[in-house]
Amino acid sequence: MTYEIDVGRAWRAVTAAINENKIPIEIASRETNQITTGYRMGPSEGGGIFAGKLLTQYRYVVSLVPTSAGQTQIQVSAALQARRLAATLGKIMSGNNAVSDVNWFDATAENPAEVAALEAWLYEQIELKVAAAPASPNIQPPSVTKAAVPAVAPAPGSDAATPSSAGIEDQLERLKSLRRRNVITESEYKALRAKALGL
């Protein structure tokens, strides 16, 4: 997905989303603009170890690709692993190696819906941070120059937007979009809106 922010701000949004959700980061390289997380336990299936309980775990690779227009593409890729636990009554009675712990195997290709849901969830977490992230210092949009800034202040009550108010309006529109899609709650929307307006 492409966002109207520079790569520095995108990096801060991604790392904040990952850290806030307590997902361990294994590799974070600003040279390649890529973050690889450690594995996190996912949902399990099966009624018990006799039925062969299925465990899952997942990890993310997030790549940030800056564009010439000052935008950043954020690409989220999830990988899913699974393993099945099984036990026999004889093993449990003996107390030795009661549960057979099978090695993890890659289950990404066999579970496209689950993988897509994992990726969509992280995109939502990142979008929350993008909406709240402060702009990078000393960076001015390429389309705005000093000559383009009006020398005369707008008349009182005028709706004419300065570059800074236009940026705030864009941020408020993104927040409204997130709220309409139920990505954020009403209370989160109000808090982020107040922060954007400096209230």
Image (spheres, rainbow, N blue to C red):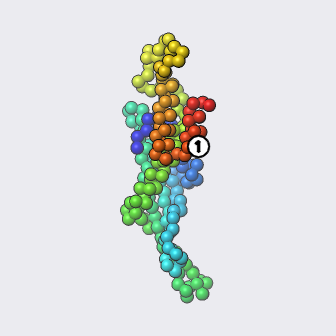
Q: Is residue 161 above or below residue 106?
A: above
The reply to whether residue 34 is visible in this rendering is no
Residue at 43% x, 38% y is: 3
Disc 1 target residue? 187
Across and down, in percent, residue 10 comes to 49, 39
Across and down, in percent, residue 96 comes to 59, 83
Across and down, in percent, residue 76 comes to 43, 49
Q: Give neighbour class at mark 1: few <14, some 14-19, many 20+ (Cα, 10 Å).
A: few
Q: Between residue 167 and residue 142, name the one nearer to us.
A: 167
Q: Is residue 158 above or below residue 46?
A: above
Q: Is residue 95 above or below residue 83?
A: below
Residue at 42% x, 65% y is: 106
Residue farthest along the front direction in this orientation: 157
In this figure, what is the number of numbered marks?
Answer: 1
Residue at 54% x, 52% y is: 25
Q: Between residue 109 and residue 36, name the one nearer to us.
A: 109
